[in-house]
Amino acid sequence: MYTTQGLTPGNAAIRELPIGLFDSGVGGMTVLRAMRGILPNESFLYLGDTARSPYGPKSVETVQGYTLQAAEELLKRGIKMLVIACNTATAAALDRVRREFPQIETVGVIEPGAEAACRATHTGRIAVIATHGTIRGRAYEEAILKRMPDAELFPIPCPLFVAMAEDGLVEGPLATGIAARYLDPVFRIPREQGLETPDTLVLACTHFPLLQSAIADVAGQGVTLVDSATNTARVVKKILREKHLDRGSGPSAGVAFCPGSTRFLTTDDPERFKRLGEQFLGMTLAPCTVELAKL
Ligand code: DGL
C-alpha cells in the first residue's frame, strides 16, 4: 500500500506533487478545466479509465473496485491530494477510498455540487440529472437535504447524455429532442399545467456541462444550471491552503500547462483519449503526454 514515506505535510517535496484527478473517462476534464483556472500554479495527474467506462450502468461493487484501483495507481505514482472527478464513482466509492487510503485527502464532486445547488435555489425545488448509478446511490439527495431539509428534489437519470457528450452530439434538434424526452416531465409539462417546477438543475455528471445549452433550452427560462466543477476546485484550494500543501507558496510556482504541469493516464487507446479529451477540456492536448496505464 502507498505510504507517504517520511514526507510530512508542509514538506516542500509534497507540495511539489501533482493533484490526482480520476474519472471513468474524459468527463472529469470539465473539473480539470475549473481546477486549472482556480489553481494556476498547481500540477495535475489525470487518470481516465476509458477501457471500462461508462460507469453509470454498472453495480456499486464494480464501480468501487475500479475506483479503488485507480486511486491506488495515482497514489503509487505520487500525488498530494485526490479528486474523484466523477459523480458515479463519488456516489459509489468516496467513503471506501477515504477508508482505504486515509493517508491522503480525498475530495468527491457531490458535496461541492450539492452546496452550489443550495446556494443557487430560491424555491428549494432542485432537479438532479445524472447517470443511473448516481441517481440510484441517492448521494445528491442526502447531501442537499442535509443542508436544506425542506428541499424538494427531482432526480432524473439521463444515461444517453454521456454517449452524446462523447460523440459531440451536444446541440441541434436531436440533442434537444433527447433532452426534452428526459426533462419535459419535470419542466415543460407541469409548467403548462400551471404547476411549480424546479428553479435549479444540477448537472450531476461531469459529462453534462458539454450539453449545457441544449439542457438550458429545454429546461426553460428561469432555471439556473449548476455543476460541481468550480465549487470542487474551490474546496480543493481551501484544503491545500489549510494543510499547507499549496504550491502557490512554494518556490517553483507558475509552470506551463503542457507538457510541464499536467500529465494524463488512460486505460485504453491514448489517441482516442486525446481526441475526446480536447472536446471536454476545450483546448488541444497535442503537446501533452498521454500514457497507457494498466490497472
Ligand atoms: N462522468 C461520469 C460521472 O460524472 C459518468 C460517465 C460514466 O457513466 O462513466 O458520473
Image: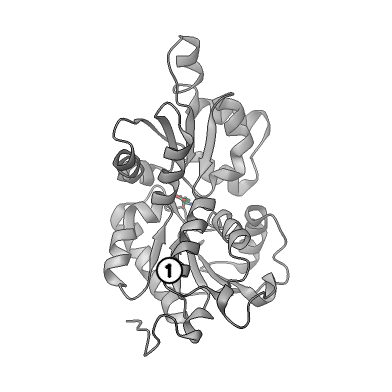
Q: Quadrant of the C terminus?
A: bottom left
Q: What amino acid type is highlighted by mark number 1? A: Glu
Q: Quadrant of residue 249?
A: bottom right
Q: Nearer the viewer, residue 115 or 277?
A: 115
Residues packed near mark 1 inside 10 Å, few (<14), some (14 to 19) or many (20 plus): few
Q: Is residue 243 left or right of residue 257?
A: left
The answer to whether residue 47 is visible is: yes
Give the percent coordinates (x, y) of residue 205.
48, 46
Q: Nearer the viewer, residue 122 or 72?
A: 122
Q: Residue at x 48, y 32 (%)?
A: 200
Label 1's element? helix
On screen, 194 above or below 101?
A: above
Q: Nearer the viewer, residue 235 or 54?
A: 235
On screen, 209 above or below 239?
A: above
Residue found at the far bottom of this picture: 6
Q: Residue at x 67, y 35 (%)?
A: 171
Q: Is residue 249 left or right of residue 156?
A: right
Q: Nearer the viewer, residue 223 or 150?
A: 150
Number of marks in the image?
1
Mark 1 lies on residue? 242
Q: Is mark 1 within 8 Å of ligand 1?
A: no
Give the percent coordinates (x, y) of residue 197.
45, 21
On screen, 54 above or below 241?
A: above
Q: Residue at x 43, y 65 (%)?
A: 239
